[in-house]
Image: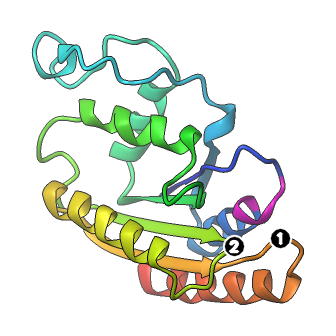
Amino acid sequence: MIVIAGSPRKGRYSDRIASHFAELTGSSLIFARDLNVGPCRACNYCKGKGDGECIQKDDMGKVINSIMNEDGIALVSPVYWWQTTGQIKLVIDRLYSIREGALRGKRLVVIMNGEAEASDAEYRILREQFSEMASYLGMEYSFLGVGTPEGNEDALEAALKAAGNLALTVK
């Protein structure tokens, strides 16, 4: 599995959760903020002449190759305004270039953390959104939403434990 951490803030809660999950699953870890990834141009080159490859020659080609060589992808992001961060959204949008059916049978794990309690609507919205994406792509799907208010180390410890429990189910 490849783990992509979406926080723009180095060393914060999302990074710590992503690192913990990657370590427990034996996965490689990529930080979206360190990637040179442009936004999808909706040119459809990848669906025609590109035959699954994007016209843009940036870091996303290496990310996609990594994904294709693994059994799945884990996306870890803080919640920003009921959504993932912009850094990880760029990566998600560029997955469009992957050939139809190429992700079928792989696993999609999404871990979202934010200020709100895990029962908050933002996690339900995100869970449903990624569930639809996984279903469309034919991927197995797991979601974890955890409340990690800034400065609350107890909440972070609970999130790390929950991520560890999830890691045991996807190994």
Q: In the drawing, what numbered circle is on residue 115? A: 2
Dot 2: within a 10 Å radius of its alpha carbon, few (fewer than 14), some, or many (20 or more) residues?
A: some
| Nearer to the camera, 78 or 4 | 78
Mark 2 and mark 1: Cα distance apart in space? 7 Å
Q: Quadrant of residue 36?
A: top right
Label 2 or label 1, whichever comes before in sequence order: 2
| Nearer to the camera, 124 or 37 | 124
Image coords of residue 6 (percent x, y): 61, 49
* Vertical comparison of 15 with 146: above or below: above
Q: Quadrant of residue 107?
A: bottom left
Tell me whether circle 2 and circle 1 mark residues in contact (CB < 8 Å).
yes
Q: Amino acid at mark 1?
A: Glu
Dot 1: within a 10 Å radius of its alpha carbon, few (fewer than 14), some, or many (20 or more) residues?
A: few
Q: Main secondary structure of the magenta part?
A: helix
Image coords of residue 152 (percent x, y): 86, 81
Image coords of residue 95 (percent x, y): 33, 38
* Vertical comparison of 67 with 115: above or below: above
| Side (left or right) of 54 relative to 99 | right
Q: Say if residue 171 shows up in the picture.
A: no
Q: Amino acid at mark 2?
A: Glu
Q: In the drawing, what numbered circle is on residue 150? A: 1
Bounds of the magenta span?
11-15
Q: Secondary structure at mark 1?
A: loop
Q: Quadrant of residue 135?
A: bottom left
In the image, what residue occupies the spot 44% across and 86% down?
A: 169
In the image, what residue occupies the spot 60% across and 80% down?
A: 146
Image coords of residue 54 (percent x, y): 30, 18
